Image (cartoon, rainbow, N blue to C red):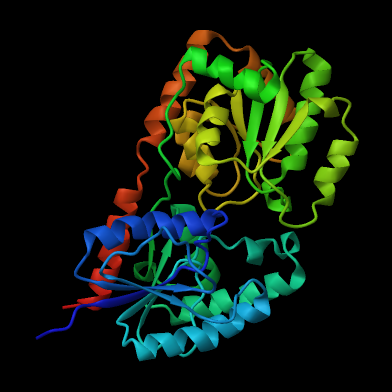
Amino acid sequence: MQRSLSIAVNTRWVLSQGLDGTGWYTKSLLDRLIVAHPEVTWHLLFDRTPPTDWQDAPNVKRHVLSPPARHWSLWWIWNEWSVPKLLEREKVDLYWSPDGMLPNALPCVGVASIHDLNFIHHPEWLPWTVARYYRWTYRKSARLANHILTVSEASKNDLLATYGLSADRVTFAYNAPQTHFTPLSAEAQRDARVRWTGGKPYFLFVGAFTARKNVSTLVSGFDAFKKRTQLPHQLILVGDFLHAEPALDKALKAMQHRSSVVFPGRAKSADLNELYGAATAFCYPSLFEGFGIPLVEAMAAGCPVVSSHASCLPEIASDAALFCDPLDVNAWDQSLSLLAQESTAARNERIQAGIDRASSFSWESTAETVWSVMHTLLHPW
């Protein structure tokens, strides 16, 4: 009797206390793959106590491997020692690492998801020890992987050019919104504005406050917009600081309209739909992305989008966004002014274009692509 396939997945970014981009990517795909393929034994590899309410299906085995890996030196121990031992002990057929890190001693087929290469092109955006570790481990993983997954065509092309890979070793499959986002009624929009800004219209940013996200340019552009137009809009910055961000601190201190900037912290999924749906526009000044999930979330929630034209963002938003130079403060000022004062007909047309574009992204489609890659590797004949 032939034994069932055994697939192990690095799930250390699926945390009880909240998910970042890699955690959402991992969880969203496994929620679909595990249900779609009960014939597979899925080994989920955590580095600490896993969420108690996630994935206890009969075809799932959860493993907690030491040490808890939240520092680059501990990442190395976890990846290079703990993971290979588990893979050998459980006789795993395929190991998939959604954060892209594969061990040197890989005893089975290996698949790595490498979302982008910001740490190569802009190492100054990260602590230097982290950037150095990323450069080493991702180059090694790209060499070892039987196949690489990524999240946009722009990222695929970057991987091919940077690591000299053949095109048949890399597959891109888009991300999708974290949850189901829908437009709000006019009444719900009014209620949301009352809740978040006391009834005033607002622009919105969602993401981490890092140098890569370039929130400082948005803040300066918003201040210029306020000085020039005297409109009542506020700017809501949803997220938190991952590292020190002196450019944003400097921009905030230089603002004339600092009191019009709101920091609500991280937002729950239900709050995000409300925040997107009632905003005058979602603003995404990022300098570099592998995909840019907030763009799609905002469009799905019926929010007009103004985006940087950097990296993959034009690919993702297509003709549904207003684009500008990420570092041009005047361009952001002018874009905010246009979106704040355009006609109802023009705004509705922009909203519909965003809804249509967002509908082309789904985790179901991406899960099918990921499974197709795994199945081909395990059944090459």
- Does residue 328 show up? no
Along the viewing direction, whichever of 144 and 33 lies nearer the viewer: 33
**Residue at the image position 66 percent from the left and 23 percent from the top:** 202
Image quarter of the N terminus? bottom left
Residue 265, located in which quarter of the rendered image?
Answer: top right
Q: Please indicate whether residue 64 sits to the left or right of residue 167 in the image.
A: right
Along the viewing direction, whichever of 74 and 308 lies nearer the viewer: 74
**Residue at the image position 45 percent from the left and 82 percent from the top:** 144
- Does residue 260 show up? yes
In the rendered image, the residue lying farthest to the front is 52
**Residue at the image position 50 percent from the left and 78 percent from the top:** 141
Along the viewing direction, whichever of 33 and 173 lies nearer the viewer: 33
Residue 145, located in which quarter of the rendered image?
Answer: bottom left
The relative height of residue 360 versus residue 209 in the rendered view (above or below) is above
Image quarter of the C terminus? bottom left
In the rendered image, residue 131, in percent from the top left (x then y), is placed at: 69, 70
Q: Please indicate whether residue 212 sits to the left or right of residue 3 in the image.
A: right
The relative height of residue 104 versus residue 295 in the rendered view (above or below) is below
**Residue at the image position 20 percent from the left and 76 percent from the top:** 379
In the rendered image, residue 65, in percent from the top left (x then y), is placed at: 50, 80
Q: How many marks?
A: 0
In the rendered image, residue 35, in percent from the top left (x then y), is placed at: 25, 58
Along the viewing direction, whichever of 226 and 122 lies nearer the viewer: 226
Q: Please indicate whether residue 325 sits to the left or right of residue 89 in the image.
A: right
